[in-house]
Image (cartoon, coloured by chain):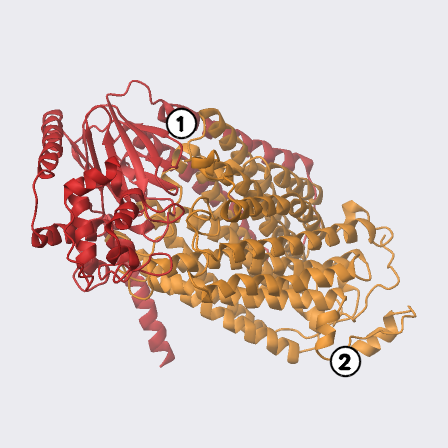
Chain colours: A red, B orange
């Protein structure tokens, strides 16, 4: 009985190791990446790795030789030597030389990584709890990038797609073969922006602007994640970069600028409560549901409920203040600069009428503009 | 057992105090000033915390067994990672080494007790209250601290749950306890050595603890300072770490790691000392390069003060800063290498046997060295941009802490347990404990190297599909390792209650003052100092 159990455990283990071994896509090693910098980082990584392997083989080799040869059970008699200055000096100097040899290429790569001069495209990256904002400096393009994996996949009621947790609604689109400079900062807590294929990882720190750069030689979609613990949904704010040819990039930029204009036009129209609720629900699920939950119940006390709350059913003015300006000292951000006026109006309308908060209020984009101007 | 204590007392104490033996009942433990009693309490407390922190680790691993959220919510997941780290560092590893110091340092230097026995009692009894305060936050509104054991501001200040205040006072109490423990160790070693026990004749365990104690005194006040600044930011409207008020969130990290890096050596140096006692015993050969071992520990301790910012390569330091911290960090590999080479030279051409303490020590040398290799890789700043805050880092520090610090503690317990309680432990069971721990630990932590290199960030409750297989393996290993520790508990209790009587020397090759006194060690030892030649 026991031997059968052991056998089954062993075969399970072996098959797990075998499965990991045959499938390259499981990833045993650092990706080489696509940029010049990421490839020199990879080379550094492999060099130091092999140096460690060689040292390990020598050191453990001597050790295991002793373990097998110098056993008392094999009649080994202990010799009593215990000091040798020559040997001590030798094994102090030799590792030191190896380290100097290693420090040289590391230094040159680091200098290259720090050279952010002469960029062609400048993009400001801002970390928010829990999404990224990308502003194309001088282009008038500015948008948020949210996780687009549906809740059902996260809570296992729907099959997970292949880009599970590594997909967003708005990708960062950049041209290939251009030096792109990232200006990285944060709005609330510290985040960290990482794309392994570029070997770019920089902390996004509120009040400070960090710089980094990349030059991508080939078109493609590159995925990364936030790598600094930033609260509840730290694991749910991926980075997705789409690198495209210059013409495609120009067209995309133009389309984004048009989109912004169209949104401004939209703000002049009025909508029925039903239309507002539909738009509001979408905006709510993207921006608000992570904390206040899709059913409006929140996760008190950190994230208060909206369902039946004083803010959501009380005076409109107070509700606008909270959403537009945020609440100091809490996780509630100032959405005034994040949502356009149409979406803002829709989401406030939604919050005031959903989950039995039936106030009947229909807030228009005009109300938002007026409030902001006060 | 009490009979043994009494006879031993008659043989050993010529002092004319009126109260020789331990008090009866709970009072013995509450009011004791005896280094052996306090040492035992530290060790039992540490083991309890080890199990508690371990349960939290298993909660984390259970959630990470498969992609998707199954068992717990991200909010609670973050509380688990935070408490797991804090409890293991401050509750399990550090008190275990203080416990060993209490038991062993007086016996090794030929002193009757610690230099400051009443303070010794106090420094222990602060700990249960500190951890009660910390763990009680789990049951409070808003939940336990959820910002990681490194508690980076402003996540731990402006955006923290209200319970952060309890956390801060808990840390203050742990700090007071550690500082008092360290003062006691230094006072004992410097003042109470037996005649003839010169500094360069001290056992390495005593040396490593002396240096560790200086590290503790140097950095625990820094930790107290940083949490106090947090307290001011949270409650008194200051802006030390708030950029909007003119403060600097990066300054938090500099101060924290100025404490934090020496802290990792605080957790490993005493283990170096333990292994340096055990390997010569079971090789039946003197330690190779005693002097260079002492100098290496000293150099590591000094270097540990100038490498802190290697934890912060991605915060956007100027190039020169990055280079300085990279070179300084690489330099630490030299004295660390010297130690490893010396241990191996000690084993070389010895006459080796493989009892449990030796098995744990050999595993220590091999696996700690693997952790050292990944540490060297992490020191290379450009590569660190890829490793930083991924599972590669998690693998690295678990390799230096689990088979490093914790295997060191296991080795020490097996080595000195017969001296403490007078009975030999069950060697067969101990070998089971070793091999299951060894397999479980490697299964749990080795795949984390692959996960990190492939791009899995640390501290996430859910992950992309390509990370699924290694996470499952890791979880299986973690549960194996965790369950095995119950075997250890059983084994220790069994040894205390029964077992073959141990001789005074216990181990054939053991040398040092602690092996000259009877087993079990009498309640008072070395009331008259021994003569060391």
Q: Can you give x and y, in whole percent of width and height, for residue B233 in the image?
A: 51, 44
Q: Is residue A154 visible?
A: yes
Q: Which mark is residue A348?
A: none
Write down the quadrant of residue A9 in the picture.
Answer: bottom left
**C-alpha distance separating marks 2 and 1:** 66 Å
Q: Is A146 on the left-hand or right-hand side of B484?
A: left
Instruction: Tell me if I can see residue A67 in this picture.
Output: no
Q: Which residue is mark 1?
A: A110
Q: Residues within 10 Å of mark 2 (few under 14, many from 20)?
A: few
Image height check: is A280 above or below A211? below
Q: Is residue B506 left or right of residue A296?
A: right
The circle on residue B2 is 2
Name the chain letter of the residue that bears numbered label 2.
B
Q: Position of residue B57 (x, y in %)?
A: 43, 62
Residue located 24% across and 60% down the image: A296
Q: Badge 1 local density, few (<14 within 10 Å), some, or many (20+)?
A: many
From what the image shows, is residue B66 above or below residue A164?
A: below
Foreground residue among B404 and A192? A192
Q: In which image quadrant can residue A189 be found?
A: top left
The front one of B351 and B225 is B225
Q: Quadrant of the N terminus of chain B?
A: bottom right
Q: Secondary structure at mark 2?
A: helix
């Amino acid at each position: 009985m026991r031997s059968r159990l052991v056998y089954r455990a062993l075969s399970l283990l072996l098959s797990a190791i075998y499965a990991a071994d045959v499938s390259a896509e499981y990833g045993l090693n650092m990706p080489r990446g696509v940029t010049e910098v990421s490839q020199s980082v990879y080379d550094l990584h492999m060099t130091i790795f092999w140096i460690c392997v060689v040292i390990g083989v020598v050191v453990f080799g001597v050790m295991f030789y002793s373990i097998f040869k110098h056993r008392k059970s094999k009649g080994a008699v202990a010799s009593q030597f215990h000091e040798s200055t020559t040997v001590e000096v030798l094994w102090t100097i030799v590792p030191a030389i190896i380290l100097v040899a290693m420090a040289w290429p590391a230094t040159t790569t680091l200098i290259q990584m720090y050279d952010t001069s002469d960029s062609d495209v400048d993009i400001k990256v801002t970390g928010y709890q829990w999404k990224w904002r990308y502003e194309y400096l001088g282009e008038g393009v500015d948008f948020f990038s949210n996780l687009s994996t549906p809740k059902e996949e996260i809570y296992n009621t729907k099959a997970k797609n292949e880009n599970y947790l590594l997909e967003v609604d708005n990708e960062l689109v950049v041209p290939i073969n251009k030096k792109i400079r990232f200006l990285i900062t944060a709005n609330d807590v510290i985040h960290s922006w990482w794309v392994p294929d570029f070997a770019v990882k920089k902390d996004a720190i509120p009040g400070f602007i960090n710089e980094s750069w990349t030059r991508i030689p080939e078109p493609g979609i590159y995925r990364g994640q936030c790598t600094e613990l930033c609260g509840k949904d730290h694991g749910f704010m991926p980075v997705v970069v789409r690198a495209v040819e210059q013409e495609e990039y120009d067209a995309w930029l133009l389309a984004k600028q048009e989109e912004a204009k169209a949104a401004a036009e939209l703000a002049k129209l009025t909508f029925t409560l039903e239309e507002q609720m539909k738009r509001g629900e979408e905006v709510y699920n993207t921006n608000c549901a992570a904390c206040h939950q899709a059913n409006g119940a929140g996760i008190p006390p950190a994230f208060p409920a909206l369902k039946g709350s004083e803010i959501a059913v009380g005076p409109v003015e107070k509700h606008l203040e909270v959403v537009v300006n945020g609440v100091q000292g809490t996780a509630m951000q100032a959405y005034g600069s994040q949502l356009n006026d149409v979406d803002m109006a829709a989401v406030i309308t939604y919050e005031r009428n959903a989950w039995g908060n039936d106030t009947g209020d229909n807030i228009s984009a005009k109300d938002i503009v007026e409030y902001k101007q006060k | 057992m009490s009979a043994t204590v009494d006879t031993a007392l008659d043989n050993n104490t010529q002092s004319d105090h009126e109260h020789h033996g331990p008090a009866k009942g709970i009072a013995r433990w509450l009011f004791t000033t005896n280094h052996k009693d306090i040492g035992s309490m530290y060790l039992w407390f540490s083991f309890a915390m080890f199990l508690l922190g371990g349960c939290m680790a298993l909660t984390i691993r259970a959630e990470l067994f498969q992609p998707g959220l199954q068992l717990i919510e991200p909010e609670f997941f973050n509380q688990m990672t935070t408490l797991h780290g804090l409890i293991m560092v401050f509750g399990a590893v550090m008190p275990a080494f203080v416990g060993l110091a209490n038991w062993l340092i007086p016996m090794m230097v030929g002193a009757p007790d610690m230099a400051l026995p009443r303070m010794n009692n106090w420094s222990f009894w602060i700990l249960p209250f500190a951890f009660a305060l910390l763990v009680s936050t789990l049951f409070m509104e808003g939940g336990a601290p959820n910002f990681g054991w490194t508690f980076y501001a402003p996540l731990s200040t402006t955006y923290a749950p209200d319970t952060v205040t309890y956390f801060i006072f808990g840390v203050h109490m742990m700090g007071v306890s550690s500082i008092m423990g360290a003062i006691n160790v230094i006072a004992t070693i410097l003042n109470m050595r037996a005649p003839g026990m010169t500094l360069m004749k001290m056992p390495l365990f005593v040396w490593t603890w002396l240096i560790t104690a200086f590290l503790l005194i140097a950095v625990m006040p820094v930790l107290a300072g940083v949490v106090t600044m947090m307290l001011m930011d949270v409650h008194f409207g200051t802006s030390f770490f708030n950029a909007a008020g003119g403060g600097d969130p990066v300054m938090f990290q500099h101060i924290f790691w100025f404490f934090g890096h020496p802290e990792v050596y605080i957790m490993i140096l005493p283990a170096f000392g333990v292994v340096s006692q055990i390997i010569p015993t079971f090789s039946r050969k003197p330690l190779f390069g005693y002097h260079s071992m002492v100098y290496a520990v000293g150099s590591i301790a000094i270097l540990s003060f100038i490498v802190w910012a290697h934890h912060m390569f991605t915060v956007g330091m100027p190039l020169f800063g990055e280079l300085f911290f990279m070179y300084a960090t690489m330099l630490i590999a030299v004295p660390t290498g010297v130690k490893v080479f010396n241990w191996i030279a000690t084993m070389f051409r010895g006459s080796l046997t493989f009892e449990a303490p030796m098995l744990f020590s050999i595993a220590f040398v091999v696996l700690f060295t693997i952790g050292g290799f990944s540490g060297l890789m992490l020191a290379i700043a450009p590569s660190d941009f890829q490793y930083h805050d991924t599972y590669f880092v998690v693998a690295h520090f678990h390799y230096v802490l689990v088979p490093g610090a914790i295997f060191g503690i296991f080795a020490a317990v097996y080595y000195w347990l017969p001296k403490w309680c007078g009975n030999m432990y069950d060697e067969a069971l101990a070998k089971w404990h070793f091999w299951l721990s060894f397999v479980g630990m490697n299964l749990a932590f080795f795949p984390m190297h692959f996960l990190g290199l492939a791009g899995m960030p640390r501290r996430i409750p859910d992950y992309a599909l390509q990370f699924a297989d290694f996470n499952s393996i890791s979880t299986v290993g973690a549960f194996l390792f965790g369950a095995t520790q119950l075997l250890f508990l059983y084994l220790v209790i069994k040894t205390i209650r029964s077992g073959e009587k141990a001789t005074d020397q216990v181990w054939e090759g053991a040398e040092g003052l602690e092996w000259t006194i009877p087993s079990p060690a009498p309640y008072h030892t070395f009331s008259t100092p021994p003569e060391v030649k």
